[in-house]
Amino acid sequence: MPQRVFFVTSEVYPFSKSGGLGDVMGALPEAMQKTGLPSAVVSPFYGRISTGNFRVRLAVSGLPVGYPWAPITADVYEAEYHGVPLYFIDRGEYFDRRYYYNNPVKGDYFDNAERFIFFCRAAVALMEHLGTPPSIVHAHDWQAALLPAYIHFLRPENPFWTNTGTVFTIHNVAFQGRFSSRLFTSCGLPPEAWNVDGVEFYGDFNLLKGGIVYADAVTTVSPSYAREILTERYGCGLDGTLRQRELHLYGILNGADYSVWNPEDDPYLPCRYSVKDLSGKQKCKEHLISELGLDPALKDRPLLGFIGRMRGQKGIDLVNAVIPDLMRMDVGVVALGEGKPEYEAEISELMEQYRGRVAAVIGYTEDLAHRMQAASDIFLMPSRYEPCGLTQMYALRYGTLPVATAAGGLRDTINPWPGEDATGFIFTKSETRELLETIRQAVAFWTDNPAGRQKMVRRGMRREFTWDRACREYMDIYRTIRLRL
Ligand code: ADP
């Protein structure tokens, strides 16, 4: 049994979060620890980190990060969340910024490679500094993808790392951290890593590829997505590399953190409810209708919700395109998100056009996301691809019927209507016509079949996507790779 796992991640809820990765890293280490495996998290100390109610203390000052040409150091802060120690890598010039990865107007930060190379190097230096070799380093996404590569090359020459296994989890293969080849020299990997079987990708430096190639095991966040990324259509150019690692590639479905997402004790809701007594859900709906200035008559009509990044991946353009037709169905639409300015503008215009029936909130607001989940009757998730998706799991728990594409984790978490065990509505092609047709079915079901609706809602609320199960699956992988070391 491994003795300690270090999770290395660019986001960890409740300190930092821009999407599902933050949620996962806020829950998985704790669940792992409860399953009996001591865990720790390493993450950047962003300027906008919410240290709110947490005691954060300086743990290491001036940690040398190992650049041969300059004495660059990191400070490390330490905190605890639900019993799990967290180490925050601090270097103001890299992380003390308003956003994590990009400025919404100007785009990606020009020095993202430098920032996250620094982060990965600092994570290695920190673990060495702490003195006890981790049994597993579990790195997440391109921002932490150099960890498995560093450890791969350190293992034969540095006894500290000899018994450390590495796992690399891909939360979305579309985000690869692809940079100019000249940045390779600053990352500290040996020259032999620069080839097509290493981190080189069509002449560029691809950090995600490094994680895939050098980790002892690669995982992604749902069984369906693990299959999809082996294909040209979903592999984003890395399907060949992934196929080479197919024997060591696993799909482990994320869990939902029901200590954060549970309508029975959600502090953000005006009113709590449960599978036994749903009356509070209707009150949450009426509250949101008034909060967003919608037509009070909507309280008796289906309210359709969208929460997520307003990007092509999430199919927000499809939602925008069907809104005029939805208005003829006499429903309300509420949307929360930020992303591509064009999609944001489109939905804002629709809100103007259908005042009182459509409400769009452009921005990132944790508490509103909870209220929207509770208030909506139908949750729209027409993703073009979806590695796992957490929002549909939250929707199920909040008694909100998902309408989603049969992609990745959506396929793995929603049982399609009209099956006996249906928990939502699924369609196959992410096109406006199919989306509209499926919403039409869902709306008809909602309005014409109150008894069936109640049953489906309750069935969804009872679904459990626990972290316990995911932990056990990760632990099996940890064990297997440690045996191979
Ligand atoms: P992804 O990681 O692809 O963005 P997920 O469904 O896995 O999508 O997770 C998204 C997480 O981010 C959920 O917790 C969701 O509530 C949250 N979220 C997304 N957009 C917003 C927003 N604009 N405001 C608040 N929370 C958001």
Image (cartoon, rainbow, N blue to C red):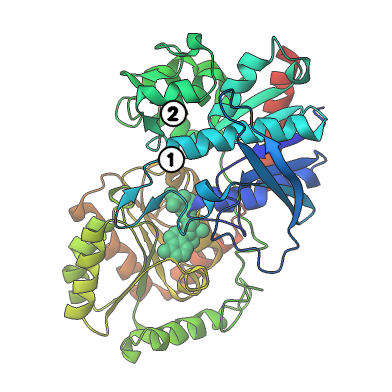
Amino acid type assigned to the residue bearing label 1 in the image: Asn
Q: Which mark is residue 73?
A: none
Q: How many numbered discs? A: 2
In the shown orientation, is residue 27 left or right of residue 278?
Answer: right
In this rendering, the answer to whether 297 lies above or below 81 is below
- Of 433 and 68, the residue lying toward us: 68
Q: Is residue 202 visible?
A: yes
In this rendering, the answer to whether 189 lies above or below 90 is above
Per the image, label 1 sits on a secondary structure element best described as helix
In this rendering, the answer to whether 344 lies above or below 34 is below
Q: Which mark is residue 112?
A: 1
Residue at point 59%, 56% (across, down) = 463
In the shown orientation, is residue 289 left or right of residue 344?
Answer: right
Query: Quarter holding the N terminus?
Result: top right
CA separation, marks 2 and 1? 30 Å
The answer as to whether callout 1 falls within 8 Å of ligand 1 is no
Amino acid type assigned to the residue bearing label 2 in the image: Arg
- Of 341 and 467, the residue lying toward us: 341
Tell me where residue 80 appears, x and y as whole percent: 76, 55
Q: Are marks 2 and 1 in contact (CB under 8 Å)?
A: no
Q: Read off the residue under disc 2.
A: 227
Mark 1 neighbour class, 10 Å CA radius: few under 14, some 14 to 19, many 20 or more:
some
Query: Quarter holding the C terminus?
Result: top right
